[in-house]
Amino acid sequence: MGARGGPPFRASVLAEAPLARLLIPFDQEWWESACFELGWTRHGGSGLGRSYTELLGMPLPHIVRDFDRVRDRLKREGDAIAAAYKKKPT
């Protein structure tokens, strides 16, 4: 419970995300991975480049959404690189 007897998070979190999205493996390793991936700026300027301060100010559902999008994009890029390598003439 929060200091005032309510939940220890903003009530808007429940309104913004389905219950299943709140049941994420939110531990220190997840948080550090999310901060790294969302803050990383890749060569050429790609990446979100969010600051730690920005992340702390974001609602958790938005952090989860952005982290999922970054991981999905990286997987698609990796799959495309692997497919291109397989098609490469030897």
Image: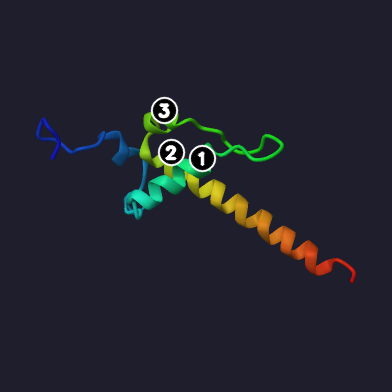
Residue 66 visible at all: no
Image quarter (top left, top right, bottom left or bottom right) of the C terminus: bottom right
Query: From the viewer's perspective, is residue 24 above or below residue 13?
Result: below
The correct choice, above or below, for 29 with respect to 38 in the image is below
Specify few, some or many for label 3: CA neighbours under 10 Å numbering under 14, 14-19, or 20 or more.
few
Say which residue label 2 marks: 62
When asked about the image quadrant of residue 7, the answer is top left
Residue 30, image x, y percentages = 39, 51
Q: Nearer the viewer, residue 19 or 78?
A: 78
User: Which sits earlier in the primary sequence, circle 1 or circle 3?
Assistant: 1
> Can residue 60 be seen from the camera position used here?
yes
- Compared across the picture, whether 89 is left or right of 29 comes to right
Label 3 or label 2, whichever lies nearer to me, is 3
Q: Residue placed at 41% from the left, 46% from the top?
A: 32
Mark 1 sits on what residue? 38
Q: CA distance from mark 1 to mark 3?
A: 12 Å
As drawn, the label of residue 12 is: none
Q: What is the C-alpha distance between the residues marked 1 and 2?
A: 11 Å
Dot 2 amino acid type: His
Q: Which residue is mark 3?
A: 53
